[in-house]
Amino acid sequence: MSTMVSGKSKMSVADYLKLPYTIQVTQDESEGYTSQFARVEELPGCMTQADTFDELGEMIEDAKRAWIESALEDGESIRCNAVGPQLSCPL
């Protein structure tokens, strides 16, 4: 279950970064080169790629921060996961 938060948010970028996100990681093997690719399911278009899995963690955090900052600046909706009976984001 998820909800959308739009308009002027009462949450900060740091608040959004603390929420749980689903990160899908795949190994990309193309043209003899292997890299790691990650995308955040709840943040459309939020993705990154790294040479190694170890580098991927920091890079996906940077991508999430940039995506959330941009969405807040543009007044776009941010999809939030529900945690148990309570929602992670204010309506």
Image (cartoon, rainbow, N blue to C red):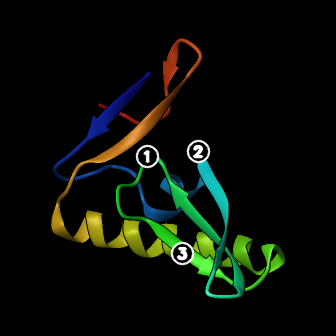
Q: Which of 39 and 72 is in front in this view?
A: 39
Residue sitting at x 16%, y 50%: 7
- List the residue tagged with mark 1: 42
Q: In the image, which disc is placed on residue 22?
A: 2
Report the quarter where the N terminus lies: top left
* Residues tagged 1 and 2 counted as in contact (Cβ below 8 A): yes
Left or right of 10, for residue 87: right
**Rendered location of residue 22, percent (x, y):** 58, 45
**Rendered location of residue 2, percent (x, y):** 40, 28
Residue sitting at x 47%, y 48%: 41
* Residue type (three-letter) at the residue carrying disc 3: Thr
Report the quarter where the C terminus lies: top left
**Rendered location of residue 27, percent (x, y):** 70, 66
Left or right of 69, for residue 86: right
Residue sitting at x 59%, y 64%: 38
Q: Nearer the viewer, residue 66 or 60?
A: 60
- List the residue tagged with mark 3: 48
Residue sitting at x 57%, y 46%: 21
Q: How crowded is mark 1: few (under 14 residues within 10 Å), some or many (20 or more)?
A: some
